Image (tube, rainbow, N blue to C red):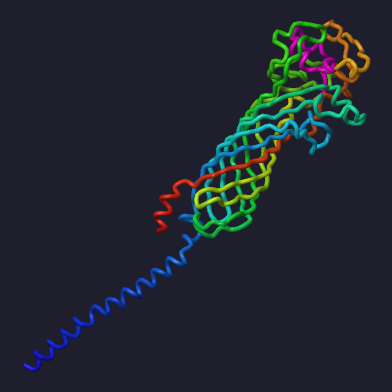
Amino acid sequence: MKKLFFGALCLAFLLASAPEAEAQFNRKAIKRNNKRIASYRGKKGGFGNKVYNAVGLSVSALNYYGDIAPRPNRVSTDISFTRPALGLSLTHRFGPRYSLMGQFMYGTLRGSDAESADKADAENGVYRYQRNLAFRNRIKELSVAAYFDLFENDATYISRVKWTPYLYIGLAGFHHNPQAQAPAAGLNGENLGVAAGTWVDLKPLGTEGQNANLESTDVNFGIKPYSNFQFAIPFGIGARFRINEVMDLWADLGFRYTFTDYLDDVSQNYVDLGVFGTNNLARAMSYRGNELPASDIPALIPYTARNGETYSTIPGYGREHQDNMRGSKSDKDIYMVTTIRLTYILGATMHKAKFR
């Protein structure tokens, strides 16, 4: 009887103390969970929410550096010929500092001797003004570039840094097609077959003798047609700013170092105007000095070309000679890209739900 009474007493004590023990256990579990949530910074090693994709839309300003520039130096450009470009991008972020961006961009480059060169500058401007070449080139560029953030983001995308400077470098392939506006008539008044002011593709014309049978003694002998498809190295600097949990604003200044000198269809020397045969349009687009106002043209000198025709040109232009340079093949063309980009992080809602 005593044993039965003692067992019942122990059971009653256990039942009475169970809720208190369970409450103590729950309080400890809650504290542990609260600490985990408070210290949560995403998975280590660049995984989890620190890896994400983003799509972007950009607006850029393009500037050209090449033979048809105001002055004969690498940093000379005419800001008045700044032209817009639009871009679409997809970015993959790998971790605290590194991202890879693929982008398609479409824009236009422009240049004009008559509008950019200073004809009062006897050393540099007069030659370029009297050359009187001009072009436009519509660029379709596909690029992949690596971006390196200067400020490390060791948290999830939700807790990413408010802003960071960055550097980028990559590889681009692009299609280009230099064009120029046709004059009203040929050098001797010939019909060119196109209306004045029509934009004409320059590559098929071979304005520096690419399609002609040049003599072995010609300065441009061995010249080959250039390709409309080219490669470039994009590089630059910028800064990215966090707008909200899922959107960033990028601003960068970059350059495209190309592997061609024909963004402007200008690279080597003038050729004898007779090498164009019966192609009056090619001849008119190769040499354009006679289109300037008469007051800006010195006395013209006639010569008999290889096709038996006589053409009058400004001395130093429009005829075969080693000193009659149309451009300089020693430097490749470059274009500058100044960009504002807005990006949106993909799958943000899903990631946020996992975080919670």
Quarter assignment of residue 202? top right
Picture coordinates of residue 127 (x, y %)? 88, 25
Q: Report whether 6 appears left or right of 30.
A: left
Residue at image point 84% right, 33% down: 71
Residue at image point 75% right, 7% down: 278
Picture coordinates of residue 137 (x, y %)? 68, 26
Picture coordinates of residue 344 (x, y %)? 51, 45
Q: Report whether 177 appears left or right of 26.
A: right
Determine if residue 352 is in view.
Answer: yes
Residue reaching furthest to the front: 243
Determine if residue 332 is in view.
Answer: no
Residue at image point 61% right, 46% down: 250
**In what quadrant of the picture does the N terminus appear?**
bottom left
Q: Is residue 332 magenta?
A: no
* Residue 225 against residue 235 in the figure, above or below: above
What stretch of residues is rendered in magenta? 269-292
Residue reaching furthest to the left: 1
